[in-house]
Image: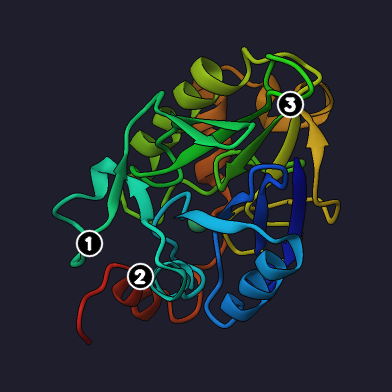
Amino acid sequence: MFFKQLATKEASLSYFFGCAGQGKAVAVDVVAGDEDWFIAEAERAQVRITQVIDTHVHADHFSGGRELARRVGAPYCLHESDRGRVQFDFTPLADDQLIEVGNVQIRVLHTPGHTPDSVCLLVTDLRRGEAPWFVLTGDTLFVGAIGRPDLTGREREMAGVLYDSLHARILNLPDEIEIYPGHQAGSVCGAGLSGKPSSTLGFEKRWNPALALDRAAFVDALTRDIPPRPTDMDAMVHANLGLVA
Ligand SMILES: [Fe+2]
């Protein structure tokens, strides 16, 4: 497989990976303005972009996912809970769904908490082994931090939902799993993010302070010092939902 991480605006991290042998790739969390980069990388690797995925409807940047999908003729994918919420057609992703990208396999994990529609993508390279190798954690789990739970309101309830998602779907994965998050230090999508753009689950279990807390303490910690809301958040969410201003 090939794998590229792109550090982009608003301390976001985008991903482009897939199976060079069979000429297929997926683009994840594309930021508006970066579409040309993905198209150039696809040409360089001689792959076709078969899916464009956003791990959730973003509140801190304008998504380029829909535009890239349109330009390359690929489906634009969001979790199925966005049905009725976004104002355009998209390809719905279901929990535990498998996406085959040549010899690369992606399992969709619905991990609500940061937002109700958040997903993580658990990736296996079938050429290397049958066990998953890494997980794109979106804004659910960062290096050294956790995604903020307040952007869609009901922050204490959503913090509890986030705790349950992490413990049921992520923390039970093997320690050697690599973590590639949706942001690094400088993002307003969480507090205390590391400037290092990847980690392992084992390291985060040991050193990410929020992961050592019980549910009540986790909810208290995540709702105690909530960062300011992203500038232009309403306009960004509005655009990413496809609503006309
Ligand atoms: Fe986010």
**Image quadrant where one finds the C terminus:** bottom left
Residue at x 56%, y 25% (from the top left corner): 217
Earlier sequence position, callout 3 versus callout 2: 3
SS at mark 1 in the image:
loop
Q: Are circles 1 and 2 on residues that touch, CB within 8 Å? A: yes
Note whether residue 119 is visible.
Answer: yes
- Residue 167 figure quarter: top right
How far apart marks 3 and 2 lie (CA) works out to 30 Å
Along the line of sight, the residue nearer the viewer: 64 or 140: 64
Along the line of sight, the residue nearer the viewer: 200 or 19: 19
Pinpoint residue 23: horizontal percent, then vertical percent. 64, 50
Earlier sequence position, callout 1 versus callout 2: 1
Query: Which residue corresponds to mark 2?
Result: 240
- Residue 133 disc label: 3
Pinpoint residue 165: horizontal percent, then vertical percent. 47, 25
Note whether residue 28 is visible.
Answer: no
Q: Residues within 10 Å of mark 3 (few under 14, many from 20)?
A: some
The residue lying furthest to the left in this view is: 84
- Residue 86 disc label: 1
Position of residue 192 in the picture relative to residue 29 (left or right):
right
Residue at x 55%, y 40% (from the top left corner): 140
Position of residue 32 in the picture relative to residue 144 (left or right):
left
Residue at x 21%, y 66% (from the top left corner): 88
Say which of marks 3 and 1 sits in front: 3
Residue at x 66%, y 55% (from the top left corner): 15
Along the line of sight, the residue nearer the viewer: 128 or 119: 128
How far apart marks 3 and 1 lie (CA) works out to 32 Å
Q: Amino acid at mark 3?
A: Trp
